[in-house]
Image: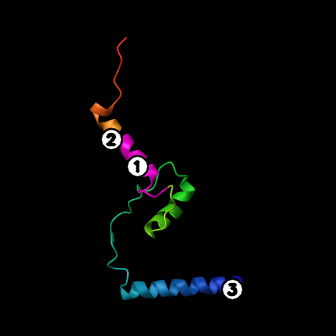
Amino acid sequence: MIRAVTALLYLAERRIEEAIARGEFDDLPGAGRPLELDDVDPLLPEELRLAYRILKNAGFSPAEVDETGERAKARKKLALLATSPSLRAPRWRA
């Protein structure tokens, strides 16, 4: 079992190296620019952020990370309340 996994890892590394040598990764979007790592919820535990980012980039993000879900709608409403003076609660004078 271990030999099969090792052989598979070796084969994958060889194929990646060959693709790099052929220049197949040269025109990827965002090449040469730093990664934008702010797209994942900062409240998410750090050990899960990379996994959730990979799922999100592949189009399979969990519902709690999905920006089209209820959580995103609630965040947008809160941001609107925080920036719009007419929507804030009135201050009462004593």
Residue most toward the top? 94
At 69% from the left and 86% from the top, the residue drawn is 3
Between marks 2 and 3, how big is the CA–CA gap?
Answer: 57 Å
For badge 1, the amino acid type reads Lys
The residue tagged 1 is 73
Look at discs 1 and 3 and give the one toward the viewer.
Answer: 1
Helix, strand or loop status at disc 3? helix
Q: Main secondary structure of the magenta part?
A: helix
| Magenta segment | 65-80
**Quadrant in which residue 9 is drawn:** bottom right
40 falls in the magenta region: no
The residue tagged 2 is 80
Observer-nearest residue: 73 or 27?
Answer: 73
Residue 43, how many percent across, how many down?
Answer: 50, 48
Seen in the picture, residue 33 relative to 91 is either above or below; the reply is below
The residue tagged 3 is 3
Residue 50, how many percent across, how many down?
Answer: 51, 62
Apparent side of residue 15 relative to residue 85 in the rendered image (left or right): right
Look at discs 2 and 3 and give the one toward the viewer.
Answer: 2
Residue 49, how many percent across, how many down?
Answer: 51, 58
Mark 2 or mark 3, which has the lower sequence index?
A: 3
User: Which quarter shows the N terminus?
Assistant: bottom right
For badge 2, the amino acid type reads Leu
At 53% from the left and 63% from the top, the residue drawn is 51
Helix, strand or loop status at disc 1? helix
User: Which quarter shows the C terminus?
Assistant: top left
Q: Local crowd at mark 1 within 10 Å, few (<14), some, or many (≥20)?
A: few
Mark 1 or mark 2, which has the lower sequence index?
A: 1
Q: Local crowd at mark 2 within 10 Å, few (<14), some, or many (≥20)?
A: few
